[in-house]
Structure formats: C-alpha cells, structure tokens
Amino acid sequence: MSTITFVFAALGAGALLLLYLWLLGAILASILSKSKGYGEKPGLGTGLLLSILAPVVWLFVPPKDEFAEWHQRKPWQRRKKPRESEMAGDASAGHGPTALAK
C-alpha cells in the first residue's frame, strides 16, 4: 500500500513541475508578444499550445510596427518609473514636452 502511495506522490510532483513550466511558457510568450505590438492574446494562445517553446518562437517573430515597445525597450531591460506628474494624470505639470504637446 505504501508503494502505491509513493508512486502517486512522485507522479503528482512531476505533474506539478510540468504545470509550472507550461504556465511559465505561456506567461513569457504573452509578455513577448505584447512588447512586439501584437497584444497579449496571441502570445497566450501560443504559450498554451506550445508550452515552453512559445517564448523561443516569439523571440523570432518580427515586431508588428516601428512603434512597438520592443524597439524602445527590450524585455530584459528595466522599465522606467513614472514621474509623479504622470502618475497623477497632470501632464501639464511635467518637466518636459509630452505626447499631447508635440
């Protein structure tokens, strides 16, 4: 009886690890597709179908347009912290030109 319990426990731990890898692949593919301008849904769908291979696929997919976040910031770079004026929504109190003022 204890041997059967041990086998089920080992299968459960392996299944949990595979589940985590599957979800990690979906999350990374979603982040990459969003940064390339396609949105999160195509990356999420690819990640759920291809598991851990999906982020590798999205590394080779070209950005959708020249305004994609991929051109300004690569996924491994840190994001800039927003200024207090940007967080408050008061663009006129900023320290430089904004997108609305250009």
Image (tube, rainbow, N blue to C red):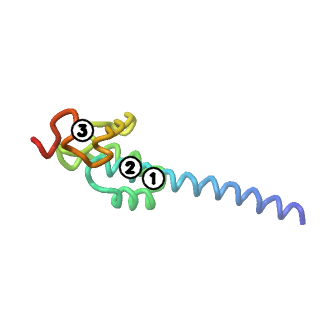
Distance from label 1 to label 2 (Cα)?
A: 6 Å
Q: Are marks 1 and 2 in contact (CB under 8 Å)?
A: yes
Q: x, y (%) of residue 61?
A: 29, 47
Category of crowding for the residue at label 3, using alpha-carbon neighbours closer than 10 angstroms: few (below 14), some (14–19), many (at least 20):
few
Query: Which element carries disc 2, helix, strand or loop?
Result: helix
Q: x, y (%) of residue 2?
A: 89, 62
Circle 1 is placed at which residue position?
27
Residue at position x 43%, y 49% in the image:
28
Residue at position x 25%, y 37% in the image:
72
Residue farthest along the right direction in this orientation = 1
Circle 3 is placed at which residue position?
71
Count of marks, rendered view: 3
**Lower sequence index among marks 2 and 3:** 2
Category of crowding for the residue at label 1, using alpha-carbon neighbours closer than 10 angstroms: few (below 14), some (14–19), many (at least 20):
many
Circle 2 is placed at which residue position?
31
Q: Amino acid at mark 3?
A: His
Distance from label 2 to label 3 (Cα)?
A: 14 Å
In the rendered view, would you say 77 is above or below 42?
A: above
